[in-house]
Image (cartoon, rainbow, N blue to C red):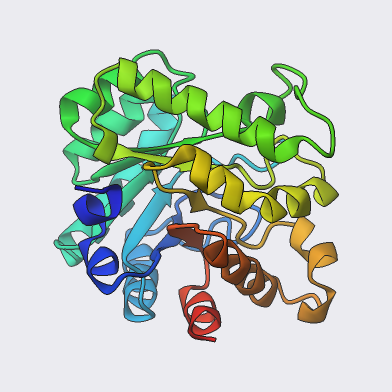
């Protein structure tokens, strides 16, 4: 069984990438901060995303934009859980992912009905791997977090960034396997916008097919949605962040990306149809 077959079976059966709609329960997201903190508003947005073709929803309550302020676990739970529970009740069959770095928050979210932990820090919390294993949850592990927060310098220069990303992801996959997490529960994220300068993202995208091959059988999730580097990369989008996101996602899928984490599911779905 593959990650898609396990957590996004419709996409797997149709032989296409899975679309993961972003639902933020945070006041300071760079894109839609504050709009969906109320459970009723979150349920309405979830309905729109699912109607537009989302295969699942990724819920988060801590912004990780550049210069973000870390949120304590109890505050993150206070923001997240009412929204997650409301969405779970409204859409009992939807696959829900929780975007968190904290094992305590992940545990509460899994208990409330999430199935996947999207951990951008890749086990920065030492309790996260065992939690994922014991819960039988899926996990997404991302490259570039420690460089993003300034915990260490990047170990690659332009010209070698795709190899740097692949090495990082393979290390995180090895850590997950060593912790006893099943191979079919592991997904990897090259971390566009994390630990990369604006022009660096285009280099990693050009090398994405090699990263996909290196990381197989773990699938790759890409999450470029509405990030600032897209404006320079796609001038033909005329400043429309969702159009630029869709163009990026179409390129990523051609390179082998298996999951797309986006705000505007309809725009990306239309781009993939060609």
Q: In terms of depth relative to the viewer, which is nearer, 73 or 177?
A: 177
Q: In terms of depth relative to the viewer, which is nearer, 207 or 47?
A: 207
Q: Quadrant of residue 134?
A: top left
In the rendered image, is residue 72 in sight?
Answer: no
Task: Answer with left or right where residue 162 lies relative to residue 86.
Answer: right
x, y percent for residue 121: 52, 28
Q: In which quarter of the image is the C terminus?
A: bottom right
In the rendered image, is residue 112 in sight?
Answer: yes
x, y percent for residue 6: 20, 50
x, y percent for residue 15: 31, 70
The residue that appears at 47% across and 78% down in the rendered structure is 269
In this rendering, is residue 244 above or below 203?
below
Task: Answer with left or right where residue 70 lies relative to residue 116.
Answer: right
The residue that appears at 78% across and 56% down in the rendered structure is 229
In this rendering, is residue 89 above or below 116?
below
The residue that appears at 22% across and 55% down in the rendered structure is 5
Q: In which quarter of the image is residue 51?
A: bottom left
The tally of labels here is 0
In this rendering, is residue 57 above or below 69?
below
Task: Answer with left or right where residue 66 lies relative to residue 93.
Answer: right
x, y percent for residue 99: 43, 42
């Amino acid at each position: 069984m593959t990650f898609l077959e396990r957590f996004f079976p419709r996409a797997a059966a149709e032989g296409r990438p899975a679309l993961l709609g972003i639902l933020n329960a945070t006041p300071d997201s760079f894109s839609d901060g504050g709009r969906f903190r109320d459970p009723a508003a979150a349920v309405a947005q979830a309905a729109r995303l699912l109607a537009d073709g989302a295969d699942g929803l990724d819920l988060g309550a801590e912004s990780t934009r550049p210069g973000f302020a870390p949120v304590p676990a109890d505050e993150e739970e206070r923001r997240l859980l009412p929204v997650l529970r409301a969405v779970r009740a409204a859409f009992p069959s939807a696959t829900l992912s929780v975007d968190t770095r904290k094992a305590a928050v992940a545990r509460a979210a899994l208990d409330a009905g999430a199935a996947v932990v999207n951990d951008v820090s890749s086990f920065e919390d030492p309790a996260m791997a065992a939690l994922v294993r014991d819960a039988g949850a899926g996990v997404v592990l991302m490259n570039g977090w420690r460089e993003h927060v300034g915990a260490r310098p990047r170990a690659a220069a332009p010209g070698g960034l795709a190899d740097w990303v692949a090495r990082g992801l393979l290390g995180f996959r090895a850590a997950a396997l060593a912790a006893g997490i099943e191979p079919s529960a592991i997904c990897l994220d090259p971390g566009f916008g994390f630990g990369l300068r604006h022009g660096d993202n285009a280099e990693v995208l050009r090398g994405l097919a090699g990263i996909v091959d290196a990381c197989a059988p773990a699938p790759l999730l890409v999450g470029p949605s509405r990030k600032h580097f897209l404006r320079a990369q796609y001038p033909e989008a005329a400043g429309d962040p969702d159009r630029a996101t869709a163009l990026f996602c179409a390129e990523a899928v051609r390179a082998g990306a298996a999951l797309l984490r986006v705000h505007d599911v309809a725009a990306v779905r239309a781009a993939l149809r060609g």
